Each structure stands twice: as structure tokens, then as C-alpha cells.
Image (cartoon, rainbow, N blue to C red):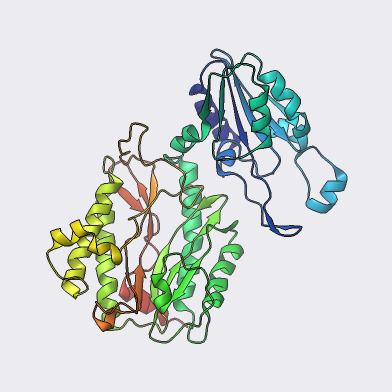
């Protein structure tokens, strides 16, 4: 778990970066309508949670900076027995004052009045440009003389690039739970299942193991469905002889895991499946081995394209000169996505890949990212050998950048053909 002291220190880091005579506001998420008067399960705004650890809706965090002195205020929903009867208990102002290391806590219905007072003689407003909020609009109207607006999200997202030891522990826990789900998916008898039934088994383990939820909508794609990158229908029967691409990870205390494994329905890879699978696996392992401080993500992606292109020429999926094929981007028909992404509170963590001047950010100790090369051979593609048609493969692991190199946080999740086939024999 992350302590309130750590959240406090994060707020201090934000405060140092604010201009004098400024006000900054971060708002909680709102409930989103699912159908008529029912709502989706609530999830806190990632930046708000990163700075507070507070999971309730209808809340705001406000920074007030004069010259060098900064004060922080938290606004929360007040206690209301009638509302709590229907929607659950609230922390309330008094308990929030004891819990959070802020200068003061107010009820959210005081926000408009307080913002008018706070905004006097303030010239700079910081807020998340991508989050719509009535409070922010009210604050804009309250300003008497605005010199500039700044996107507060840029400050917070850059901070989120480097994970603390406590954040890494939570990601480890998410990965460990996800490992159990993937291993069960490999070992269970899948001969008469539909994709959604396997998905239910995976997500059941997430919840039984204490994960908050899945980190994203699980992909359970049998056969040619794997060639749709974001396939989430998950409603087709699994067929003997096919592979299943499973892209599924849980979220534990707001921190995500993101794991992909591609496994055979019947527990045994065919020769053609082995050829494609071992190509992707070999590329993934080589790319992971390159990770260390100072390396660029673009370098990894370029290398993955080169290696996959070489392999596709070897297997007869592409023909011609490697350099020409890469220049023509012929490989992108079979490898259209990037090699990986940041991982953290969001599964695609909202941290920058480039500095404001456009230069790419190099890896540093404490960053966490995924590495996920893939090959996708659609069954209707008559330009490739018949034996490869209808096969889609992606292999994805979660990697921590360390002082001297890397640590594969998900190395314990079976991924070699030998490991997968051995687990598949466990019934």
C-alpha cells in the first residue's frame, strides 16, 4: 500500500513546479451512465488518485501558491445518512482532515465560494485540459486577470514516469495474480469452451485473488480472431487445432498488469504454429535484453521491426530485400503496432514519451513498460503460405528498468512452447 506521506510528497513536488500567484485544481472522476439510471462501476481519475489516494467521487484537490508558499485543500462529499443508505458510506470532512496531509478539508458544496476567494490576485491557472469540470469552468469565470492557463496533467504525467518502490510492489502483486489466471487458462480443458467462458475463468481469478478489477477489457481471441488487434467480442467457440491469443491483466489497488500469451486450444502447437511462435518469442527476448537506462523506446521498436522482417523472409511470408521491405513498410501488414508502452496506474500509462522540445525520453531506473511484438496472418491473405493463414500471435511481458538493466516482472508466467505444453497437460 502507498502511505499518505508518499501522496503528500507527490503534492509537494507538484507545488514546486507551479508559478507564483497561481491556483491549480485536480478533480475526481464522475460516475458514467451505463443505461438509463444505472452506472458503470466507478473508477477514480488516475491523476487525482496519484496525488491523494482518495477513491470517492465528487471531490477536488486545490493548490494555492502565492510567492513561494503553497497551501493545499481537499474538498469532499459531506456526510448524509439518507444518501449513504442508498450509495454507501462517505469518509466525510472530519475523518478526511485526520487522514490527509493537507492544509484544510472542506465540503464540496463550499467549492464555488472558496474558489472565488482563492482566485483573487492569482494570475495563473493549472488544470487538466482533457478533463471537463464545472468547478474548473467556475474557476475560469472567477479569475479577474488571467495571464495564462497551464496543463497540470503534463506535470503529473511526467512524475508518473518513475515508479516508487511502493508502486512497483503493487505492480508485482497485479502481475502475480495475473500469472495465476493465465496459468489456469493454459491448463484448463478448453475443448468445449467459448471465448467468453475462458474470459470468465480468468477474471474470476482476478477477483478471487483480491484484484480491484481487470485493468482493461480482456481479449480472448481464438483462431483468426487474434488478427483483430483489439478483439473484445469474445463470443465464438474455441476450436481444436487453433491458437488462442489471451491479452488479460488485472488491476490491483489501481496499478495495472498487462500480459499476453498465445496458447493452443488442445495444448499442443502444430509445426506451423511453432515456427511463427518461436519467431515472435525470439524477437521479444532479444528486445527485452536490450533494455537499460539510456536506451530509447524507438530503438527497441526499430530493432523489433528488423528482426520480425528477417524472420518473415525466412518463413516465406515476405519476399525480397530486408532493407527495401522495411523502407516500403511491407512488414506493417503483419506487425502494425508498437513494441510496447508505459505501464502504471493506467494500463497505457499517461506518461510522456518525449520532452516538450520533441526529443525522446530515454529509459531511466524505475520506469515500467511492456514489450509485446506480434505477427498477424489473416486467413484471407493468399499472399502467404497456407499453413500460416489464420494465425495471430502476440507475447507481452511487463518490464522494470533497473540501475544496470532490467527486470522482467512477469518472467514467471509460462511462455516457451515447452512450458506451455507442459502446463496444458495438467488437467
Q: Which residue is drawn at 51% across and 28% down?
A: 150
Q: Which residue is at the far left?
A: 321
Residue 318 sits in quarter: bottom left
Tally the marks: 0
Q: Residue at x 77, y 29 (%)?
A: 110
The percent position of residue 71, horizontal first and vertical second, equals 62, 21
- Reply above or below: 92 against 401: above
Q: Nearer the viewer, residue 376 or 307?
A: 376
The percent position of residue 294, horizontal first and vertical second, equals 26, 40
Q: Which of 229 and 238 is in front in this view?
A: 229
The percent position of residue 69, horizontal first and vertical second, equals 57, 15
- Reply above or below: 182 against 41: below
223 lies left or right of 304: right
The percent position of residue 338, horizontal first and vertical second, equals 34, 55
- Reply above or below: 41 against 23: below
Q: Residue at x 27, y 73 (%)?
A: 276
- Reply above or below: 183 against 171: below
Instruction: Please say whether residue 100 is visible from this viewpoint.
Output: no
Q: Nearer the viewer, residue 358 or 372?
A: 358
Residue 1 sits in quarter: top right
Amino acid at each position: 500500500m502507498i502511505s499518505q506521506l508518499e501522496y503528500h510528497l507527490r503534492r509537494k513536488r507538484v507545488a514546486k513546479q507551479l508559478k507564483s500567484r497561481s491556483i491549480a485544481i485536480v478533480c475526481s472522476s464522475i460516475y458514467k451512465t451505463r443505461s438509463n439510471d444505472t452506472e458503470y462501476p466507478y473508477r477514480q481519475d488516475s491523476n487525482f488518485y496519484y496525488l491523494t489516494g482518495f477513491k470517492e467521487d465528487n471531490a477536488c484537490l486545490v493548490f494555492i501558491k502565492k510567492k513561494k508558499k503553497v497551501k493545499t485543500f481537499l474538498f469532499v462529499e459531506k456526510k448524509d445518512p439518507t444518501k449513504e443508505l442508498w450509495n454507501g458510506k462517505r469518509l466525510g470532512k472530519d475523518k478526511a482532515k485526520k487522514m490527509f496531509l493537507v492544509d484544510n478539508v472542506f465540503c464540496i458544496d463550499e467549492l464555488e465560494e472558496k474558489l472565488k476567494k482563492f482566485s483573487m490576485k492569482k494570475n495563473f491557472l493549472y488544470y487538466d485540459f482533457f478533463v471537463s469540470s464545472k468547478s474548473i469552468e467556475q474557476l475560469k469565470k472567477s479569475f479577474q486577470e488571467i495571464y495564462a492557463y497551464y496543463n497540470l496533467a503534463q506535470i503529473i504525467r511526467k512524475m508518473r514516469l518513475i515508479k516508487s518502490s511502493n508502486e512497483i510492489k503493487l505492480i508485482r502483486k497485479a502481475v502475480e495474480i495475473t500469472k495465476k489466471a493465465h496459468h489456469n487458462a493454459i491448463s484448463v480443458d478448453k475443448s468445449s469452451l467459448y471465448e467468453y467462458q475462458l474470459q470468465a475463468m480468468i477474471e474470476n481469478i482476478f477477483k478471487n485473488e483480491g484484484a480491484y478489477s481487470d485493468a482493461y477489457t480482456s481479449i480472448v481471441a481464438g483462431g483468426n480472431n487474434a488478427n483483430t488487434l483489439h478483439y473484445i467480442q469474445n463470443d465464438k467457440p474455441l476450436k481444436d487445432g487453433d491458437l488462442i491469443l489471451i491479452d488479460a491483466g488485472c488491476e490491483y489497488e489501481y496499478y495495472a498488469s498487462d500480459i499476453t500469451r498465445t496458447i493452443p486450444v488442445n495444448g499442443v502447437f502444430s509445426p506451423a504454429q511453432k515456427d511463427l511462435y518461436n519467431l515472435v518469442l525470439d524477437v521479444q527476448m532479444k528486445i527485452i535484453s536490450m533494455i537499460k537506462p539510456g536506451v530509447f523506446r524507438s530503438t527497441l521498436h526499430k530493432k523489433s521491426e528488423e528482426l520480425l522482417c528477417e524472420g518473415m523472409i525466412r518463413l516465406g511470408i515476405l519476399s525480397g530485400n530486408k532493407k527495401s521491405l522495411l523502407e516500403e513498410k511491407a512488414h506493417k501488414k503483419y506487425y502494425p503496432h508498437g513494441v510496447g508502452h508505459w505501464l502504471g496506474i493506467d494500463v497505457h500509462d499517461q506518461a510522456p514519451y518525449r520532452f516538450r522540445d520533441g526529443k525522446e525520453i530515454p529509459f531511466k531506473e524505475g520506469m515500467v513498460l511492456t514489450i509485446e511484438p506480434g505477427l498477424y496472418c489473416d486467413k484471407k491473405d493468399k499472399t502467404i503460405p497456407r499453413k500460416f493463414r489464420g494465425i495471430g500471435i502476440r507475447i507481452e511481458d511487463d518490464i522494470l528498468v533497473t540501475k544496470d538493466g532490467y527486470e522482467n516482472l512477469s518472467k514467471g508466467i509460462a511462455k516457451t512452447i515447452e512450458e506451455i505444453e507442459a502446463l496444458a497437460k495438467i488437467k
